[in-house]
Amino acid sequence: MRKCFLALAGAAVVLAMFGSATAAVKTVTITAAGFVPADVTIAANDTVTWRNTDTVAHQVVVDKAPCTLTIQPGASGSCTFRSAGRFSYSDPSQRGKSFRGTITVTAAPAAVTLQTSRGTVGYLGAVTLSGVISSQQSGETVTVFGQDCGKNASTRLGVATTTAGGAWTLVVRPAINTIYRARWKTTDSAAATVKVRPGIRLSRVGSRFTVRVRAAQPFTGKILAFQRYRPLVKRWVTLKRVTLGAAATTTTGTVVTTARFRASIRRGWRVRTFLTQAQAGACYLAAPSNTLRIG
C-alpha cells in the first residue's frame, strides 16, 4: 500500500503526543463506475485510503496538496491530512464527474503539551521545558508560566517560538519548587512540577566547619545533620546537629543561610551535612551537602 503524508517533519511524534489512537481512517472505494463515496469529511491528522476494486489501474491526484497516487488493481494507497481545508481530487485518466471528489478537513482542537527534562533539580539547575502544539505549525508563540511554591499566582517566565512540526523548547532555572504551564493562544497545557534541592556547601579549616545553604528563602533556625560515612555498614551516621544562623541576600536574589561549628574528626573520614525533608519544608526537597574527605 502506498502512503502519502501531508505534514511537516516530525509529525509522527506529534501524533504520539496528542494520541494517535484517535486518528481515523476513511476509505474510498475505486470502482469501474467511480469513487464511492466521492466526498468525505475528516479531522486534521486523519487519513484517507483509496482501495482499487477495479480491474485496471487508477490515479488519485489531490489539488493543492502533495498527494499523487497510482493504484494497481486490488491495491490501495493513502494520504494523511494534517491541515484544515477543502481539497479536490480526481483520477485524471478517467472522464466524468464520478471520478472527482472532495476531502473536507476540519481543524484539530487547539492543544499544547508540556514536559520537563527532569522532575528534580539542584538550586538554579537548568531544566528544559518542551512540547508541541496541535496545529503543528512553525512560527507560533508559546508562553510559559511558573508558579513558585508558596505563591498564589503564576508569573510569565518567557516565550518560545515553535519550529518544524509545532515543537517548542524553553530552558528554565527554578529556585524553588515550581509548577509550570504552557499557553498557546487561549489554551493551557497540563501542569508540570519541578522540585528543587537547596544548594548546600560544606567547607573546613582544621576542626572548624562552615556550611552555607543557598535558596530563595532563609533557613534560619533549621537544623542540619553533620554526618560521617561508615563503610562497614554502608550508611551515613549523624555525629551532631547544627542549627543554621543568620541569612543574607546576595545581589542576585539568592538567600544564603550560614552556620559555623566545631567537630572532632579523624583522618580518612568522609563527612557531610544533610538537610532532612522535615527541615527543608514544603517548598524544597531534602538535600545533602558536598562530601569532604578528611586528609
Image (cartoon, grey):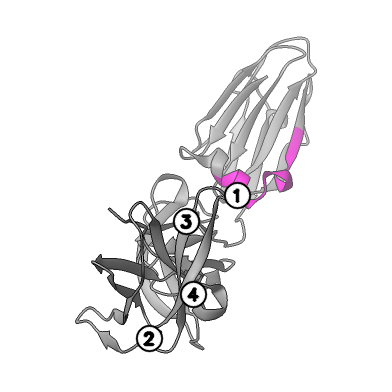
Nearer the camera: disc 2 or disc 1 = 2
State which tag comes first along the sequence, 3 or 2. 2
Nearer the camera: disc 3 or disc 4 = 3
The residue that disc 3 covers is 229
Residue type marked 2: Pro
Q: CA distance from mark 2 to mark 1?
A: 40 Å
The residue that disc 4 covers is 284
The residue that disc 2 covers is 218
Q: Secondary structure at mark 3?
A: strand
Residue 222 to residue 52: above or below: below
State which tag comes first along the sequence, 2 or 1. 1
| The quarter of the displayed image where residue 199 is located | bottom left
Q: Nearer the viewer, residue 50 or 108?
A: 108
State which tag comes first along the sequence, 1 or 4. 1
Residue type marked 1: Met
State which tag comes first along the sequence, 4 or 2. 2
Q: Quadrant of the N terminus?
A: top right
**On the picture, is 192 further left or further right than 101?**
left
Residue type marked 4: Tyr
| Residue drawn at point x = 22 percent, y = 81 percent | 250
Which residues fall within the magenta stretch? 14-27
Task: Confirm whether the magenta stretch covers residue 22.
Answer: yes
Residue 284 to residue 142: above or below: below
